[in-house]
Amino acid sequence: MNSFSRIIAAAFYLALFFILFPWFQYVIDIDAISYIHVAQRFANGEYYYSLNGYWSPLISWVLVPFIKMGYDPVLASKYINGLLGLLCLFSCNVLTDKFNINSTIKRVLPFVLAILLVSFAFYELCADLLQLFLLLLYLNLVLSKDFINDNIKIIFAALVAGLCYYAKAYSFPFFFMHFTIVTIVALLKSKPMQFKKALISKLLIGFITFLLVTAPYIALISHKYGSFRISNAGMLNTSWFLSPGTGDTTTIVAVPPFGDATSYWD
């Protein structure tokens, strides 16, 4: 019964997406414009300018082939969002199976998620839904049977977490904190000597894999901006509370970073 209701919920999601698409196809947020500009610069071969510490690159890289083929990047983003929303719906269904949830709620939940995900697909560019989908994959791996004793699963989870970082930089500290807590909790029943050895081993496997995935991009943006960093996004968000969005407490108007930039957001 759960499988049938989930298939109907997926059909419901697709119907909502295509019925509402004509009214929401050009709804776009400020962040979306900057992600698209990064993709356009990459597509034009302006690799240095496409390297942007404020905007995580993965969704821009996904958009590049569509821009090169001549598709409207806004419409391409919406269709990518539609696919990501559907994948998130399936991933959420798999995740809920890992918890003891009332059967009636399990049947209703996919329809609620379908409505939420359609809303997300239209009101946010796909960087956010891409991050959500990858995070759901990571959580499904971490919560899979006998995860902590399977080094292959740990490696795959760290690889997916690395992709999460490329989707949204906030995933970098999240992975280190979350994976550490998960590992400690999973090993608590071990004997003290075994606990210490296993903890170090599992953390090293996860952390090294994650850093191997993320290190190339961190090295590139650190070189570009002249100091070590995993992202500039935290600095930008902090600046909103110190000045009118510019990060400079002495200047109200911020100069765009490039001659052809539309705003300082670039």
Image: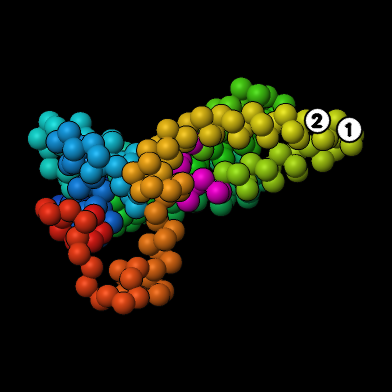
Tell me whether circle 2 and circle 1 mark residues in contact (CB < 8 Å).
yes
The residue indicated by pointer 2 is 197
Residue 71 occupies quadrant? top left
* Mark 2 residue type: Lys
Q: Quick one: 42 or 164, which is closer to the camera?
A: 42
Q: Residue at x 23, y 43 (%)?
A: 49
Residue 264 occupies quadrant? bottom left
Q: Where 67 sits versus 29, above or below?
A: above
Element type at mark 2: helix
Q: Tell me the colour scheme of the image.
A: rainbow
Q: How many marks?
A: 2
Q: Quick one: 97 or 82, which is closer to the camera?
A: 82
Quarter of the C terminus within the rendering: bottom left
In the picture as drawn, the residue positioned furthest to the front comes out as 226
Write the start and end of the magenta stretch as one range: 162-174
Q: Residue at x 82, y 41 (%)?
A: 188
Q: Is residue 4 visible?
A: no
Q: Residue at x 38, y 41 (%)?
A: 223
The residue indicated by pointer 1 is 193
- Dominant SS of magenta comes to helix
Element type at mark 1: helix
Q: Residue at x 64, y 28 (%)?
A: 205
